[in-house]
Structures are given as C-alpha cells and as structure tokens.
Image (tube, grey):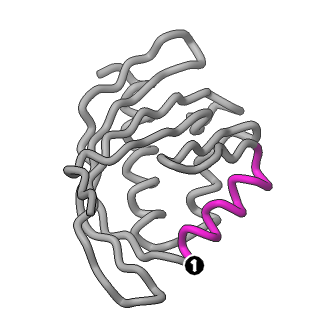
C-alpha cells in the first residue's frame, strides 16, 4: 500500500468511528464539498447540505455498531482513489429499540482536496439475505 492508499485506509477508520459515535460532524469532515452519499433504497444526497441532512436523519433513526474490513484500496490518479470494503455489526432502531444484524458491501471514491483524502462518492448495499414475507 502506498502513502496515499494508507491515508485512504486511515480515513475509513475515522469514518467507522464517526458512524459508531453517531457523529454527524465527524462524518461530514471526511466528505469532499461536492460529495455524494448513496445509500441503498434511498435517493442520493449530493453536496454538504444534503449529506448533512442525510446523516442527521440516519443518526436520529438508528444507532450503528459496525466494523469495516478493507478489501482493497487503489490510487487511480494523483488525486483519486477508490476503496472497497465490507462491514458488519448491528443496527438499533430508536423508535422500537429493536437491534438487528447489519452487513454491507461498500464502494468509496476518494478525492484529494487540500492535501486530504475526502469521500467524493459513497454507496453501499446489504449482504444479508433478503427476507420477503
């Protein structure tokens, strides 16, 4: 892993901490100004105002306890890199108090902004079996 890829991996550790702390500001600090948050089954949130609103809603609705496993990080250009991760843990719904398993695969596109690696695009999808009922 080169220096840039190690910096991206470090940003992923900080992102995991932000999620587990339900810390909107810490999560936003990791995003590029024009970043996009693209959760499964939801519209994309693009730009800091929309991304802030999305994370505020997420943390108002659920508490996450997740751990990321970095599958790969590759620098694509001097200021661009991607990371593929897997995460697992639990989600607790505030309205009901119900805790359930959480597992996703994630794709992050990072852009170096002002010398720091920032999330430019982030999308994820569940890896848990579908339960139709």
Q: How many marks?
A: 1
Residue holding disc 1: 60
For the stretch drawn in magenta, the main secondary structure is helix
Q: In the figure, residue 115 lies in which quadrant?
A: top right
Query: In the figure, 19 relative to 1: above or below?
Result: below
Query: In the figure, 62 relative to 71: above or below?
Result: below
Q: Position of residue 44 (x, y in %)?
A: 65, 43
Q: Is residue 116 magenta?
A: no
- Extreme front residue here? 133
Quarter of the image containing the N terminus? top left
Query: In the figure, 112 relative to 9: above or below?
Result: above
Q: Position of residue 95 (x, y in %)?
A: 47, 88
Front residue of this view, candidates 33 and 36: 36
Q: In the figure, residue 20 lies in which quadrant?
A: bottom left
Q: For numbered disc 1, what is the local secondary structure?
A: helix
Q: In the figure, residue 58 lies in which quadrant?
A: bottom right
- Extreme top residue here? 77
Q: Is residue 55 magenta?
A: yes
Q: Position of residue 97 (x, y in %)?
A: 36, 89
Residue density around tag 1, few if under 14, some if 14–19, many if 20 or more, within 10 Å: few
Residue at (69% x, 53% y) in the render: 51
Quarter of the image containing the C terminus? bottom left
Residue at (48% x, 63% y) in the render: 18
Residue at (54% x, 10% y) in the render: 77
Region rendered in magenta:
47-60
Front residue of this view, candidates 41 and 132: 132
Residue at (38% x, 43% y) in the render: 125
Query: In the figure, 67 relative to 7: above or below?
Result: below
């Amino acid at each position: 892993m080169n220096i840039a890829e190690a910096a991206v991996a470090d940003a992923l550790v900080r992102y995991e901490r932000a999620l587990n702390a339900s810390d909107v500001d810490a999560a936003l600090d990791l995003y590029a100004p024009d970043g996009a948050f693209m959760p499964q089954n939801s519209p994309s949130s693009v730009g800091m105002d929309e991304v802030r609103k999305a994370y505020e809603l997420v943390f108002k609705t659920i508490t996450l306890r997740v751990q990321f496993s970095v599958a790969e990080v590759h620098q694509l250009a001097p200021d661009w890199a991607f990371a593929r991760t897997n995460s697992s843990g639990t989600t607790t719904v505030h309205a009901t108090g119900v805790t359930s398993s959480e597992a996703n695969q994630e794709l992050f596109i990072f852009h170096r902004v002002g010398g720091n690696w920032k999330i430019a695009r982030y999308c994820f999808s569940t890896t848990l079996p579908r339960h139709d009922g």
